[in-house]
Image: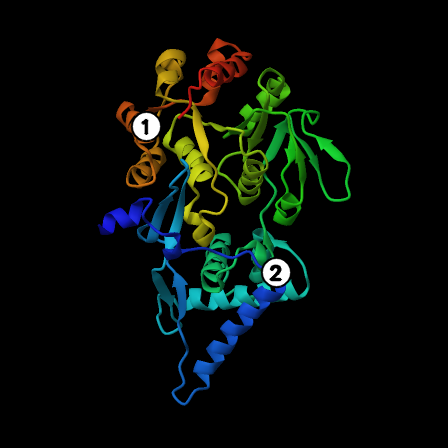
Amino acid sequence: MGDLLKSSIFFSDQHLCHADILPPCEVRARIEVAILNFLKHLYSTDPAISDLPLISRKVSNSRVSRGLLTESSRIFLSHSFCTKSLMNENTASSFIRVWKVMEMCYQILVQEKKVTQRELFYKLLCDSPKYFTSQSQVNRSIQDLVALIRCSRYSLGIVASSRGAVAGRLLLQEPQQEVFDCSTCGSSGYSISGDLSLLENLVMKSDARYIIVVEKHAIFQRLAEDRAFNQIPCILITAKGYPDIGTRFLLHRMSREFPGMPILGLVDWNPAGLAILCTFKFGSIAMGLEAYRYACNVKWLGLRKDDIEELIPEDSLIPLKPRDHQIGKSLASSEILQDNYKEELAAMIQTGYRAEIEALYFHGFDFLAMYIGKKIVQANYI
């Protein structure tokens, strides 16, 4: 029964953790409470430096929440804690880094500014070089602070770097700006902002029938340049690789704005491509308490095993790299994958080869749009 509760529709969301989206005043209040609690223990009759209780971000603390009436599934973190202590030599430095990041975020909120994680790294590198020597240390400390304060990174004043793009049959209007037609922006597309507040306030209109999530920027550029959205009434969106928050947020926003519009994923046939698709579809444990927030019901359009057998020349197949096997092993151990996804992953590992979307160019540069159109007409997606 325990396993059933852990992974099925019977698992209640009340057992699952999330990061709140809060106004600056409430975030500052939470930080102030954390500081007061720390000082309370420090100046009590039995003085002590209190540990930091953080929601564990390990895979073992992840849970799958599946809807009763929908096909949607999402990854959550449960209420399992880990601690960071100044008294433990293994966690002392990371303990201090959390407080340093908290201090910096408080200053940002007071000044009513927004910074990227990269900007935050350079500021901390200058102010506290003893504790911050790499971007990854800052990123982990931010996630620790999110787990401690229970609010989103954006609420802390941290924005995502702009990376993704959107093109096709979509009209966008930023507040107090003119309407932007995403079908006229050429192969580069409309650059997706990392400012989630701006994305939330976009006015959207579309006569598209599909949203196509494209893994690779080069493929996105080909489809946009060929104006594939005129043949297939669609919106094209890409994160140019692994999904960033801004792109995931905009896709989720479009899924709410156009609820009847299917979202279809076009990725390489390899474990990394499947991992990217799953991040859009289910969320990512790497996002900590924000893992689930921007998950969308993305269907896998291609590339898939049947495409490899029917359309891809054998000479175009590339041997899997050690990194592919590592990602494949991680995906195979996940309870989130549905059976037909597991079959595709097993076929990748069994053959020992991967195929990139560009291999379809064997049939000509115009074939890509025809391939997508045919699969959509046949409803050939899973």
- Residue farthest top in this picture: 363
| Secondary-structure class at tag 2 | loop
Q: Label 2 belongs to which residue?
A: 23
The label number, if any, that marks residue 216 in the structure image: none
Q: Where is residue 314, by image quadrant?
A: top left
29 or 158: nearer the viewer = 29
Residue closer to the observer: 209 or 306: 209
Q: Residue at x 40, y 32 (%)?
A: 274
Label 2 sits on what residue type? Pro
Q: Quadrant of residue 327?
A: top left
Q: Can you say whether 308 is above or below 177 in the image?
A: above
Amino acid under label 1? Asn
Residue at the farthest front position: 69
Is residue 188 visible in the rendered image? The answer is no
For marks 1 and 2, the one nearer the N-term is 2
Vertical arrangement, residue 97 with respect to residue 48, above or below: above
**Horizontal placement of 76 versus 183: left or right?**
left
Q: Residue at x 62, y 55 (%)?
A: 115
| Quadrant location of the C terminus in the rendered image | top left
Q: Residue at x 42, y 40 (%)?
A: 282
Can you give x and y, in whole percent of width and height, for residue 244 in the image? 53, 42
Q: Residue 209 at what x, y percent from top left? A: 57, 24
Q: Secondary structure at mark 1?
A: helix
Is disc 1 in contact with disc 2, using a CB cutoff of under 8 Å? no
Q: Which residue lies under the disc numbered 1?
A: 340
**Residue 281 visible:** yes
Label 1: few (<14), some (14–19) or many (≥20) C-alpha neighbours in 10 Å: few
Callout 2 crowding tier (Cα within 10 Å): few <14, some 14–19, many ≥20: some
Report x, y in % for residue 240. 54, 34
Q: Nearer the viewer, residue 79 or 206?
A: 206
